[in-house]
């Protein structure tokens, strides 16, 4: 089965980036037993932060969703690093916690975080279906629009 | 022991609702090993959102606590679905994460989330005692006052 | 190996406080399998809340970092209680979730939560390296500047 998920990624035209370096004094993933905990990921590409601004002000709901999709790619990149490059070792996505940097009257956090959830399902199929929380927060690191962390069951 | 928790619910006059459908592209619970992760639940009854508004503005602390109690019932409904209807298979409540949609100077998040914590203890006794976080956030999905997710150990 | 971590704490001049009592109706830690979930800890010393105020207003980034370091000591105190007083039973820090009570335009949550992350590494060495999330929130219990919860693997 090796390479099944990679084939799917190629089919979707998705490029899993090199795992970004943490912004501070922690590590991007920890495995304990069959679970991998992924540190909070933000929209970052080629070392630069992207989607800096608040949803409902600088960014629309749809733009926030796109940011969440990019965050999900970074989650995949960390997961890939945790699994020695083999995403076929993912048993299932367990939980995503989505934080949306938004104005106080923005109430469509679920639609924004869908950008990440949909990517997981596109990539892993039913194994990508996960439990989730989505909340709106006052501010996020470096002013980015979305931060998401997660737990995955792996083999 | 089958039905012990259900008997307790009846004694308390509590009606566990039918598990609400997620508001977006995710699933309401995932089991991995002996843990069940419950997705963020909000106050929702018969398909309608309830307690829309911020604690400290539209709602008082006590009203927020009542909202949290209703959220806890929805957590139980998802847990029941995860356990094929048998809440006696709950070994213990492990962790609740409570998010209170509140004004920036509201500082009684613990009292609000107690509405959920107390329900867990009423229903499961000592097995309902859990670790917990309670924070105040700028906004929540659909404008509801409280969102809570959780982890439970099950058999 | 008994006492290795305690010796390290003494060397660092760190005093792990007596585990604070929860502010509400929950318990400060739960063990399930080899994981200990620590409830959200806040800066509290000798029964009094400390660092009351928002980062970016009442407190600077560096003061927020100091608050996070104090919170980490309270996390250690709860962990110690969970392990019958023996911190050498910590296998590794798995995940910290850091919530910073800050003004909406504050974007250095990672630097603040580093106060906790660095302490974990000082105390446990490589075993203290953890995955992490850091977000900014509108308000925290009792108005404190930082709240952090966590998951640890133990033996």
Image: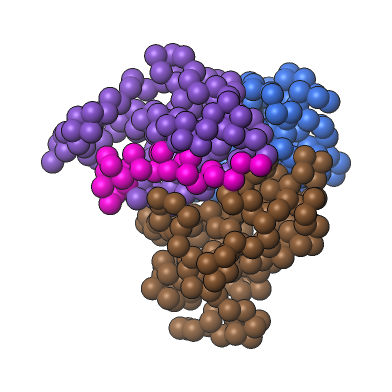
Chain colours: A blue, B purple, C brown
Q: Position of residue B95 (x, y in %)?
A: 43, 47
Give the residue at x 65% y 83%: C13
Q: Nearer the viewer, residue A67 or C56?
A: C56
Q: Quadrant of residue C12?
A: bottom right
On screen, B143 above or below A80? above
Give the residue at x 73% y 61%: C65
Question: In this view of the protein, can residue A128 be seen by the observer?
Answer: no
Q: Position of residue B153 (x, y in %)?
A: 34, 46
Q: Nearer the viewer, residue A17 or C132?
A: C132
On screen, C32 above or below A108? below
Give the residue at x 78% y 30%: A54
Question: Residue reaching furthest top?
Answer: B47
Q: Nearer the viewer, residue C77 or A144?
A: C77
Q: Main secondary structure of the magenta part?
A: helix
Q: Position of residue C48 (x, y in %)?
A: 57, 65
Give the residue at x 77% y 39%: C104
Q: Is residue A115 magenta?
A: no
Q: Position of residue A155 (x, y in %)?
A: 48, 46
From the viewer's perspective, is B121 left or right of C151? left
Magenta-drawn segment = B105-128
Q: How many marks?
A: 0
On screen, A32 above or below B29? below
Question: In this view of the protein, can residue A48 be seen by the observer?
Answer: yes
From the viewer's perspective, is A45 left or right of B122? right
Q: Is residue B118 magenta?
A: yes
Question: Residue reaching furthest left?
Answer: B1
Q: Nearer the viewer, residue C58 or C93?
A: C58
């Amino acid at each position: 089965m090796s390479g099944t998920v990679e084939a799917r990624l190629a089919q979707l035209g998705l490029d899993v980036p090199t795992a970004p370096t943490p912004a501070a004094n922690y590590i991007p993933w920890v495995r304990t037993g069959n679970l991998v905990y992924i540190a909070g990921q933000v929209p970052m590409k080629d070392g630069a932060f992207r989607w800096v601004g608040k949803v409902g002000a600088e960014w629309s709901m749809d733009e926030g969703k796109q940011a969440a999709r990019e965050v999900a790619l970074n989650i995949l990149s960390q997961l890939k690093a945790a699994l020695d490059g083999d995403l076929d070792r993912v048993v299932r996505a367990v939980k995503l916690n989505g934080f949306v940097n938004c104005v106080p009257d923005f109430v469509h956090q679920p639609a924004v975080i869908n950008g990440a959830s949909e990517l997981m399902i596109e990539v892993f199929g039913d194994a990508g279906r996960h439990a989730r929380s989505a909340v709106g927060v006052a501010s996020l690191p470096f002013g980015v629009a979305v931060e998401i962390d997660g737990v995955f069951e792996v083999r």
